[in-house]
């Protein structure tokens, strides 16, 4: 029983750490530009597969490859905004359709190159091995992930509240027109926002996937659903809400898979159950303001 | 005659902001009443509360003896309260005729339109608002004045006994205003109770025999326009905002 | 009075058909119908009858599916990214009742379609609080979870696991008869969907799409009509889903529930031109045959490069969707037809 409780707490924290990194960027993009980026999960998945591909033509220095991959995905996020999203951003349907198309394109591209067999990218673990306490062993990479996630989230919060770009981002999210009247180039701010979002998803993948596995090109959708559950729990566009929501979803998922009979299969349903409940009782989320049309 | 609309202690809070504060008034059947106040006084919120687009934080609204507080908008429409919006809205990919067919298909609209058919009934409304020659075109290419008429046409489709007109004159030229005034007067003559907002008092002065004034969500005056216009609090409310009403 | 009107309508019908047939769209439709009627008899070649002809059958199944999506998203403005739910659920229900309960195929088809309607209700109601992109994501989330439920975990065995149900009977052992059964149902489905979109109900759907607040202010119970739109759309998606199950004589989670199917519906309807309904049919034929051609081409060699084109098919489809949405909001196929129509009018001296 004790082992199970420790297991639950540890896995829940790991889930929360990874979900908060992914959902933060997703929520940011929606909050600032009302852009529903369905390719967000695909960015995460693509990072994992790039870690798999790049060593074949780059010097085998893991940190260097990982850095290049993250930069690559960040640039793809920026290009996605410039080429695809920006011309359509006034029609929410257009944005949703095109990011859906982009997500599918990335998925199929990965499918062509790597198929659906699972792969491991464990050589990118930053810390290998496990830490043992008498009745339980922790995967070191996950311990690292928890701390890294906390640090990244804090740095991100500082960046949003203190830096010049952060202030512009907040200004645009509050009132786009007023911000552009104040001389803020809103399109450039949205571009940076999308790049930051892709960057966070990519970092999340670099930290998490080496200790997990690449489960095929369609795994991005699962992370997208999780992000949606997190964000709808915390409130669309609320950053504090996203982090809190991520840990709630993380612990609930972990609790379900450990304490409920046949848990792991029910754990898959946790995000949708959260989504449905939230939609029925409080669509604006716990922290979000009700969206006024 | 008798009271048709009774609003009692109506309050609406948005977070920390109180948009409407303990607001009460009554309107008699067949009256023609204006609601005035500077921009941001809470007029539109009052309309949204009456028409059900927002739920009051507290207070009661009774219409024709029925408690309509917090009912859904379409139910309120089907009891006989129709409204127009300050910003014109239309079904932009439907023809003007179909724009008016929609309210004719509502529960209340159907009662009168089913005898002649929704389309015929809608086109008679189009005729009465002076748009019948444009029945087949979509609203996107209409001038602003015609869009305002379309708003009223859409409201009429539901066969209302009470009409809420939110700033119907904003953005109209003098000629367009006159045409619209005539249209509204005619509706009033036909027995529709009319409740109309405006932030420029002069617009309403000549139109309505009674105005209710509000400021910062609160009731401040009620009476004939001349009297209200000379009310000290009303003058202060307008002057304090630096907005003329003359 | 109503009876007289009906009688009048029926009496006028041949004349109406005649005048419709001489319009461009009407003429083109009739031409397409004639082509589709004679196509099964063009060759006795085994490959033609057993491989090529079924592609038409498949295209028609997806035409119904894409049209059902267009009714919900294009006409009613409720963006669904989870249309595979209705498609898949109906296929599974149909398969279950045939294989496990021994029901006749036609009863199973009806039960499958009605099951989809029930799911339309089940998913429509919670999703109705969502607007625009939220709704898209909500429906997508539902379909992903259903897929997971059927595919993995301990619940999956209740739902027949990743293997699904196989060994279903075909609609007919003769591909030509199967073709004509689907052909007739496609025509009926399209007539019904187009008539709905032109009816008063369709006008109400469009008003909700254009301005939901305005529809509310017009005394329309928007919630009720959105649920109706969900249910009608789910019915036709379900009908297509049962046909698809019988076409493959099997169902499995990824094949019937996969996000790919939702993607197909979106792709086909968008390429054809949203809100046009008939565009969905054009899109369906285009993609089914593009897929067929890419598979037929198979592996090509350019110098040292060996490319298996069939692997790339969905990537190519996704690219087409991106290009269509980005550069041609109104779709591609319908606008091309409209240009042809102008040409036709010029040639006819109108």
Image (spheres, helix red, strand yellow):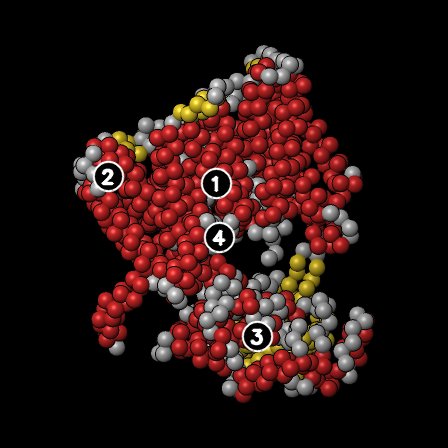
Up/down of C313 relative to C209, above or below: above
What is the quadrant of the C terminus of chain B in the image? Answer: bottom right
Q: Which residue is mark 2?
A: C97
Q: Which residue is mark 1?
A: C320
Q: Is the residue under label 2 in contact with that under label 4 (CB below 8 Å)? A: no
**Side (left or right) of A261 relative to B34:** left
Which of the pair B24/B172 is nearer the observer?
B172
Which of the pair A149/C183 is nearer the observer?
C183
Identified at 59% across, 85% down, the residue is B182
Viewer-nearest of discs 2 and 3: 3
Q: What x and y, as percent, mark residue A207?
A: 62, 23
Viewer-nearest of discs 4 and 2: 4
Q: What x and y, as percent, mark residue A43?
A: 57, 32
Chain of the residue under label 3: B
The CA span between labels 2 and 3 is 58 Å
Q: Is the residue under label 4 in contact with that under label 1 (CB below 8 Å)? A: no
The CA span between labels 2 and 1 is 38 Å
Q: What x and y, as percent, mark residue C294?
A: 39, 32
Instruction: Kindly tell me whether residue B86 is visible in this rendering.
Output: yes
**Side (left or right) of C244 relative to B205:** left
Identified at 78% across, 73% down, the residue is B243
Are marks 4 and 3 in one subunit?
Answer: no
The CA span between labels 1 and 4 is 14 Å
The CA span between labels 4 and 3 is 28 Å
SS for dot 4: loop
**Side (left or right) of A226 relative to C37:** right
Q: Which residue is mark 3?
A: B146
Residue C330: numbered disc: 4
Q: Is the residue under label 1 in contact with that under label 3 (CB below 8 Å)? A: no
Identified at 39% across, 41% down, the residue is C287
């Amino acid at each position: 029983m004790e082992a199970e409780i420790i297991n639950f707490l540890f896995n829940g924290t790991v889930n929360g750490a990874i979900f908060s990194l992914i959902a933060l960027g997703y929520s940011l993009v929606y909050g600032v530009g009302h852009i529903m980026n369905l390719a967000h999960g695909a960015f995460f998945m693509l990072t994992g597969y790039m870690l798999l591909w790049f060593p074949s033509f780059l010097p085998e220095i893991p940190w260097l490859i990982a850095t290049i991959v993250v930069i690559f995905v960040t640039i793809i996020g920026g290009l996605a905004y410039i080429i695809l999203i920006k011309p359509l951003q006034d029609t929410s349907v257009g944005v949703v359709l095109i990011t859906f198309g982009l997500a599918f394109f990335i998925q199929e591209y990965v499918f062509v190159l790597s198929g659906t067999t699972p792969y491991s990218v464990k050589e990118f673990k930053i810390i290998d091995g496990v830490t043992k306490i008498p009745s339980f062993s922790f995967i070191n990479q996950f311990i690292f992930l928890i701390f890294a996630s906390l640090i990244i989230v804090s740095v991100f919060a500082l960046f949003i509240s203190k830096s010049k770009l952060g202030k512009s981002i907040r200004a645009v999210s509050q009132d786009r027109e007023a911000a552009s009247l104040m001389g803020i180039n809103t399109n450039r701010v949205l571009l940076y926002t999308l790049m930051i979002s892709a960057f966070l998803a990519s970092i999340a993948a670099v930290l998490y996937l080496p200790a997990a596995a690449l489960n095929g090109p369609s795994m991005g959708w699962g992370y997208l659903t999780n992000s949606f559950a997190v964000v709808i729990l915390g409130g669309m566009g609320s950053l504090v809400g996203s982090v809190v929501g991520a840990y709630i979803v993380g612990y609930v998922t972990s609790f379900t898979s450990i304490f409920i009979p046949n848990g792991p299969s029910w754990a898959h349903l946790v995000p949708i159950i959260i989504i449905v409940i939230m939609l029925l009782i409080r669509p604006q989320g716990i922290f979000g303001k009700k969206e006024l049309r | 005659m008798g009271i048709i609309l009774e609003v009692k202690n109506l309050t609406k809070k948005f977070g920390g902001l109180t948009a409407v504060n303990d607001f009460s008034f009554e309107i008699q059947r067949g009256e023609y009443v204006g609601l005035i106040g500077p921009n941001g006084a809470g007029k539109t919120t009052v309309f949204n509360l009456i028409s059900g687009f927002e739920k009051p934080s507290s207070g009661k609204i009774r219409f024709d003896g029925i408690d309509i507080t917090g009912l859904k908008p379409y139910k309120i429409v089907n009891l006989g309260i129709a409204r127009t919006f300050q910003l014109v809205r239309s079904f932009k990919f439907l023809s003007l005729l179909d724009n008016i067919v929609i309210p004719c298909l509502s529960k209340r609209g159907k009662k009168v339109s089913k005898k002649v058919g929704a389309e015929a009934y809608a086109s008679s409304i189009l005729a009465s608002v002076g748009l019948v020659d444009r029945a087949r075109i979509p609203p996107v290419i209409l001038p602003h004045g015609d869009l305002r008429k379309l708003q009223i046409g859409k409201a009429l489709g539901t066969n209302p006994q009470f009409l809420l007109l939110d700033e119907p004159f904003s953005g109209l030229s003098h000629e367009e205003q006159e045409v619209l005034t005539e249209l509204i007067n005619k509706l009033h003559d036909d027995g529709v109770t009319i409740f109309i907002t405006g932030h420029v008092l002069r617009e309403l002065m000549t139109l309505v025999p009674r105005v209710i004034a509000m400021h910062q969500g609160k009731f401040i005056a009620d009476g004939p326009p001349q009297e209200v216009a000379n009310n000290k609090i009303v003058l202060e409310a307008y002057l304090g905002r630096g907005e003329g009403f003359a | 009075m109503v009876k007289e009107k009906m009688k009048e309508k029926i009496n006028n019908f041949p004349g109406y058909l005649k005048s419709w047939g001489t319009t461009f769209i009407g003429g083109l439709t009739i031409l397409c119908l004639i082509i589709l009627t004679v196509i099964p008899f063009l060759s006795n070649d085994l490959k033609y009858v057993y491989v090529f002809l079924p592609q038409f059958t498949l295209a028609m199944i997806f035409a119904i599916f894409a049209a059902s999506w267009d009714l919900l998203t294009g006409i009613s403005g409720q963006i669904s990214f989870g249309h595979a739910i209705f498609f898949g659920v109906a296929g599974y229900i149909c398969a279950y009742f045939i294989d496990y309960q021994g029901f006749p195929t036609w009863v199973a088809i009806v039960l499958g379609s009605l099951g989809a309607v029930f799911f339309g209700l089940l998913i429509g109601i919670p999703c109705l609080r969502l607007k625009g992109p939220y709704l898209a994501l909500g429906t997508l989330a539902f379909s992903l979870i259903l897929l997971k439920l059927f595919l993995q975990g301990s619940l999956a065995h209740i739902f027949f696991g990743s293997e699904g149900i196989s060994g279903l009977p075909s609609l007919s052992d003769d591909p030509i008869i199967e073709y004509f059964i689907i052909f007739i149902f496609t025509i009926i489905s399209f007539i019904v969907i187009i008539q709905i979109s032109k009816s008063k109900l369709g006008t109400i759907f469009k008003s909700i799409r254009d301005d939901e607040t305005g529809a509310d202010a017009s005394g329309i119970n928007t919630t009720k009509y959105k649920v109706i739109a969900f249910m009608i759309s789910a019915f036709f998606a379900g009908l297509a889903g049962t046909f698809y199950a019988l076409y493959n004589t099997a169902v499995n989670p990824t094949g019937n529930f996969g996000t790919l199917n939702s993607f197909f519906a979106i792709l086909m309807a968008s390429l054809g031109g949203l809100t046009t309904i008939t565009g969905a049919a054009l899109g369906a034929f285009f993609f089914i045959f593009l897929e067929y051609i890419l598979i037929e081409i198979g592996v090509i060699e350019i110098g040292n490069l060996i490319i298996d084109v069939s692997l790339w098919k969905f990537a190519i489809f996704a690219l087409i969707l991106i290009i269509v949405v980005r550069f041609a909001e109104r779709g591609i196929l319908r606008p091309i037809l409209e240009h042809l129509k102008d040409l036709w009018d010029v040639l006819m001296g109108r």
